[in-house]
Amino acid sequence: MSFDNLFNYAYAFVILSYIYMLLTVGVVWKMYKVYYANKMILKAIVVHRCLFQTFIWMQIANLLFFIFDNIVFRLPSTGFFTKLCDYLAPSHLLKVLYMLQLFSNYSSIYYSFLFCLTRLIILFITESHEKHSNKVICKKLCFVFIPITLITPIIADFYMIPAPGACRPLKPPYPPGAISISYGPSLFNVHSLIFDISDMCPFLDKN
């Protein structure tokens, strides 16, 4: 089987990923709407409120990563936007898209970790003591953790701020016309290893 046929199948997988992502968004929105619309659920100890909030944040981060990862890597590698990139000169707008992909990638990892950590806290720490209950600990954890999720991606990607963004062609086994969004000379000539990993497997589901 030729690589062209393989990538034809890859197009189908990209479309399929959009279908199940839309279904996921619909389910999460329904959960959010039911949870906050029903006051009885909020009063009853059915779902831990802090755990549910971290779950929603995790899903939002995963959705943002899915969107920007498709814009930067998956869709351009199919060759759909090759002609469009021919008309686009290197600009900071393309660089911002790349940085948003990295930012959403970090956020997806951070909030997945926060969700798992919150579950462990609820599991091993009871609510018997008011000052040391799992609700108090989870609130303090979120108060400290959320600013970290906003600051550390900026620190990690600071070297890209002066770099222009541009489209670059991908080498075989990618089909002719396959491209991806990259960036030019950066501060201290630093490059991200995340790009190399994503470049190798743009059609893998990372959510």
Image: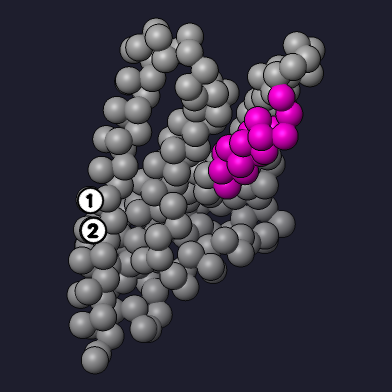
In the image, 167 versus 103, the foreground residue is: 103
Counting from the top left corner in percent of width and height, residue 3 is at 28, 85
Residue 136's mark?
Answer: none
User: Is residue 50 left or right of 62 when viewed as pictured?
Assistant: right
- Stretch in magenta: 109-126
Counting from the top left corner in percent of width and height, residue 47 is at 49, 24
Q: Residue at x 71, y 24 (%)?
A: 126
Residue position marked by numbered label 2 in the rendering = 16
The kind of residue tagged 2 is: Leu
Q: Are marks 2 and 1 in contact (CB under 8 Å)?
A: yes
Q: Which SS class for mark 2?
A: helix
Counting from the top left corner in percent of width and height, residue 198 is at 48, 64
In the image, 129 versus 157, the foreground residue is: 129
What is the distance, in whole Å, between disc 2 and disc 1 at their CAs? 5 Å
In the displayed orientation, state which residue is furthest to the bottom.
1
Residue position marked by numbered label 1 in the rendering = 19
| Within-10-Å neighbours for mark 1: few <14, some 14–19, many 20+ | few
Taking the image as drawn, is residue 26 in sight?
A: yes
Q: Residue at x 38, y 71 (%)?
A: 169
Tell me: residue 16, above or below residue 59: below
The kind of residue tagged 1 is: Ile
Q: Residue at x 30, y 35 (%)?
A: 27
Q: Which SS class for mark 1?
A: helix
Q: Is residue 120 magenta?
A: yes
Q: Is residue 189 magenta?
A: no
Where is residue 153, by image quadrant?
A: top right
User: Which quadrant of the figure contains the N terminus?
Assistant: bottom left
Tell me: residue 94, above or below residue 152: below
Where is residue 6, by image quadrant?
A: bottom left
In the image, 49 versus 165, the foreground residue is: 49
Tell me: residue 176, above or below residue 140: below
In the image, 125 versus 24, the foreground residue is: 125
